[in-house]
Amino acid sequence: MSMQTRKKHITTTEILKKKNTEKITMLTAYDALFAKIFDGEVDMLLVGDSLNMSFFGESDTLSATLEQMIYHTKAVCNGAKTSLVVCDLPFGSTICEQIALEAALRVFKETKAQAVKLEGGAEIAQIIKHLTQNGIAVVGHIGLKPQFMRLEGGYKVKGKQESELESLLKDARALEEAGAFCFVLEGVPSEVGKKIAQSVGIPVIGIGSGVDVDGQVLVWSDAFGFFEDFKPKFVRQYLKGAELIRDALKEYAKDVKNGDFPNVSESY
């Protein structure tokens, strides 16, 4: 039975209950059109600051603004009636408790998102705690953190060294203790992903972190073959989207140029 038969929004409580019982599905979305298609087919929709790259064409996520995130989150919420919607808090909006709370309050007041997502581990645990104490549901994000790519000199797999594993385990426990109801774990070896998932009582949503976590998230344009510049190792393409669109475009252009479109039935 399709999840689209559901009427009510999936809640943070339902996501928590899926730990060790049912794999969680998460996908990015940036507009109402695709959010409506994805809605109910996945548990969670992430309005990721990845939109700065896949939607806006920038080389990284860092220039995404809170206004952009709120605009796109509004659009996604207009299309999604079942899936739980999460809004990424962009680079610079979580540098201290007060700024993070102001940003999260704007998201909650101006959109219908059920949660915000923050990048960082133990070092931002107090910020996450401040948000949750003020009624903001939080998704964490540790491991490879795209907002830190300039500091770290690129996108690098984490957890290869024992010291990195211990640091990630510390981060995971800190997120749970701070009140996050789940977190994204990006770019770690499979065995590390498994250990981290087993170390906490909240769901761990993997991206490039192996199969032994509590769920998976992908950027929709990666998963459906619309992004063609390169394919990350952790991506499985479920559709040749760009190729299909390009073939359809050629058909459209041909029909217009040879006078076949519009035909009599397509005209008033």
Image (spheres, grey):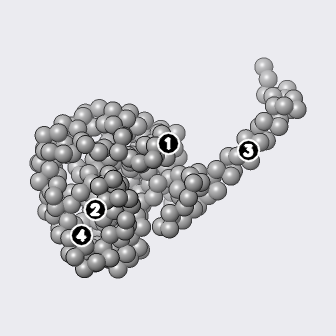
Q: Secondary structure at mark 2?
A: strand
Screen quadrant of the C terminus: top right
Q: Is 205 drawn above or below residue 50 in the view shown? A: below
**Residue placed at 38% from the left, 59% from the top?**
154
232 left or right of 205 in image: right
CA gap between label 4 and label 1 equals 31 Å
Instruction: Report if the CB atoms under discs 2 and 4 are less than 8 Å apart.
Output: yes
Residue 65 picture quarter: top left
Q: Position of residue 77 (x, y in %)?
A: 39, 39
Which residue in the structure is indicated by mark 2? 142
Residue 193 picture quarter: bottom left
**Residue placed at 22% from the left, 76% from the top?**
163
Q: Secondary structure at mark 3?
A: helix
> In the displayed image of the protein, which residue is found farthest to the top?
268
CA gap between label 1 and label 2 equals 24 Å
Q: Secondary structure at mark 4?
A: helix
Q: Secondary structure at mark 1?
A: loop
**Residue 168's disc number:** 4
Question: How many marks overall?
Answer: 4
Task: Name the amino acid type tagged 2.
Answer: Ile
CA gap between label 2 and label 4 equals 7 Å
